[in-house]
Image (cartoon, rainbow, N blue to C red):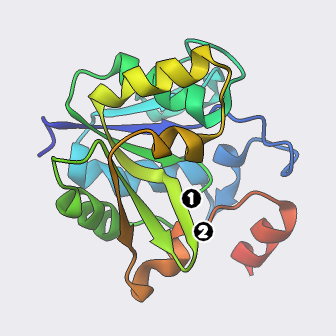
Amino acid sequence: MENKITAYILAGGKSQRMGKDKGMLLLNDKPFISHICFALQPIVGNNIIIVSATSDYDFLGHTRIEDIIADKGPVGGIYTALQHSKTKFNLVVSVDTPLISTDLLQWITDKHEDSYMMSQVKVGDKTSPLIAIYDRSCKTVFGEHLAAKQLKLREVIKDMSHQTLIVPSKWHKQVQNINTPEEYEKLES
């Protein structure tokens, strides 16, 4: 499937709650972003693109692109990814999910149905549209929302056909976002 899918890691956030770049935080002596690349590689090979303005990620050797329209959050990041993409399917992962595994990402890829424009995951009552598959055709909907200055990702998703995959309990922990120093401290302990 690696020729049919591209992975995009969204690493362009300001990390305001964390106070430092989340992608460069260490887990087991490796940056978060390294863990995510490692999990993605068996699925997409080297077809991993990092969406970020910071050159700190260049050590990974993957292509890095900057947001087409700066400071538009995840909506702008996904729009940039979809505009850049040359594949129908695009696996989008946020840089603050360092526990994600190849098994979970492969499961999402296998469960995605072509009839949907997007597939996101859900644990409990929380959906995670930043661990998801987006069809390249979604870029039109993202563009419309950006033009209207509507930057809430969940609102964009309401305007497209999508499926929500209930994550099996064995993978619940992998879906958590690490956004604050407190969450990072718990992760390290």
Examine the rendered structure and indicate whether residue 94 appears above or below residue 52: below
Q: Nearer the viewer, residue 61 or 16?
A: 16
Q: At which x and y percent is residue 8?
A: 41, 36
Q: Amino acid at mark 2?
A: Gln
Task: Tell me the quarter of the picture where residue 20 sits.
Answer: top right
Instruction: Name the element at disc 2.
Output: loop
Which label was assigned to residue 152? none
Q: How many marks?
A: 2
Q: How far from the left and from the top, in percent, is residue 81?
A: 43, 26
Quadrant where the C terminus is found in the figure: bottom right
Mark 2 neighbour class, 10 Å CA radius: few under 14, some 14 to 19, many 20 or more: some
- Residue labelled with disc 1: 97
Amino acid under disc 1: Thr
Residue at point 52%, 68% (across, down)? 175
Residue at 37% x, 57% y is 39
Residues tagged 2 and 1 counted as in contact (Cβ below 8 A): yes
**Residue 28 percent coordinates (x, y):** 60, 67
Q: Can see residue 63? A: no
In-image side of 117 versus 20 (left or right)? left
Does dot 1 land on a helix, a strand or a loop?
A: loop
Left/right placement of residue 30 relative to residue 24 reads left
Separation (CA) of disc 2 from disc 1: 6 Å
Q: Which mark is residue 176?
A: 2
Image coordinates for residue 168, horizontal then vertical, percent = 37, 83
Query: Taking the image as drawn, is residue 165 in sight?
Result: yes
